[in-house]
Image: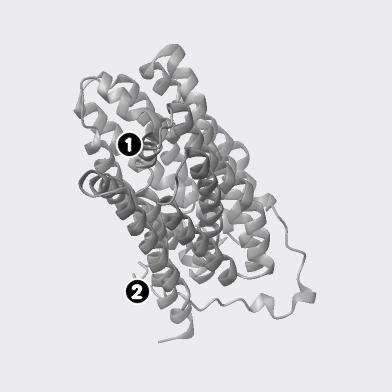
Amino acid sequence: MSTANVRARLWTRDFLLICLTNLAVFTGFQMLMPTMPVYVQSLGGSETMMGLVIGIFTLSAVAVRPLVGWALDTVGRKAVLVLGLALFVISALLYGWASSVAFLLGIRLLHGFGWGFSTTAAGTVAADVIPPERLGEGMGVFGLAGTIAMAVAPAMGLYIIGRFSFVLLFSVSAALAITALLLAVPISYRLPHFADRAAQPRAAFFEPSAVRPGLVTLLTNTTYGAIVTFLALYAAGQGIANIGPFFTIYAITLALTRPLCGLLMDRRGFDVVVIPGLVCVGVAMVLLSASRHLGMFLLAAVFCGLGFGAVQPGMQALTVRGLPPYRRGAANSTLYMGFDLGIGLGAIIWGGISQAVGYATMYLMAAIPAALALLLYLIIGRQQGRRPDGSRPRPARSARSSLL
């Protein structure tokens, strides 16, 4: 096997470990998403307190990400990832000891810090171990962790509290975080750029080149915030008691789309994936606004999966494309800030709009951020259709790359 072939190998030991680490973290996190409001209610909290408990988690993650990006590029990947996972473990264990909503808010603040540390670090480590010429494919596979977790973890969490207890729920979440920590420790964190610190440019809290994909992510996730926050209520108003199949179809489509779009990006460039993806997100919102029966909701789920399955790995690859390792931490922190802010702001904005105009009109209006994201990408976000390794796509299709 030639040296070039070895360098182009995607499925290395380190790549597998960081993908499994990400899967364990996201599963432990997604288990708590639908169950946390129920836990707040059990502590005597109101709907307002439920929103605050969810919101403080997002705000703490956003606040810490610039610091995390700087630390990744100066202190090192391993220390930051291990610290984030340790905070995740501690938070999950502390949930069972919460005796009041005020105490719970403090735990959520700590948990948000752990989430900000661990997810930013994991994305940066993935970018380190993926070959540049397979960055789109690698990020597509890496991102499947969140998709798989979203498909199974919420139902798992609800089953545990319905059949057993919150104590078991938090114990399982902590066990998954411990598993992630054990998987992360043996990763070979290859950082040759740390060998000569005097020759390095100073690391930054923000990466200017990541602002554009970060803004596209913020806008598309603002749209996604309308789905995760209000879809169940909207469907119930249409006489659909169980909207679970929507998320199942969405997750399946996303799982199929992400790696395929990653391969397409590596061969043909970003434009051929990202532009249709943003269009699909807008179409999904229009379909949701017109949905009156389950079939229409499921069709919208397919377009959601196609859209987000194309846009998310595209923005992840675009964020770190061509950057030296000592700037990837700041780049990923900039991108993930857009990710968090989009969902958080979306939940707040669409909540007010839905009260004023109703859910159907709200979902129609939710196509606007997708259209703005497309406009932003076309005007200032495109990289002349370049592939993730920075080269221009060849008109003729290149030879099929190996999956191993």
Instruction: Identify the residue at horizontal 33%, vertical 58% (top origin).
Output: 172
Q: Is residue 129 left or right of residue 214?
A: left
Q: Amino acid at mark 2?
A: Leu
Circle 2 residues within 10 Å: few <14, some 14–19, many ≥20: few
Q: Report which residue position mark 1 lands on.
A: 303
Residue furthest to the top:
356
| Residue position marked by numbered label 2 in the rendering | 404
Considering the numbered disc 1 on the image, is that residue within a helix, a strand or a loop?
helix
In the rendered image, the residue lying farthest to the bottom is 1
**Residue occupying the far right of the picture:** 198
The image shows residue 182 at horizontal and vertical percentages of: 42, 73
On screen, 83 above or below 238? below
Give the residue type that dot 1 points to: Phe
Looking at the image, residue 10 sits to the left or right of residue 317; the answer is left
Choose the circle earlier in sequence order: 1 or 2.
Answer: 1
- As helix, strand or loop, the secondary structure at mark 2 comes to loop
- Residue pictured at 55% horizontal, 39% vertical: 341
Q: Is residue 90 left or right of residue 168?
A: right
Q: Position of residue 174 (x, y in %)?
A: 39, 60
Image-quadrant location for residue 230: top left
Q: Quadrant of the N terminus?
A: bottom left
Find residue 237 and report its horizontal and vertical position in percent. 27, 19
Within 10 Å of disc 1 (Cα), the crowding (few <14, some 14-19, many 20+) is many
Q: Nearer the viewer, residue 29 or 301?
A: 29
316 lies above or below 36: below
Disc 1, disc 2: CB below 8 Å? no
Residue 125 in picture, x, y percent from top left: 52, 67
Quadrant location, the C terminus: bottom left
Find the residue positioned furthest to the front: 99
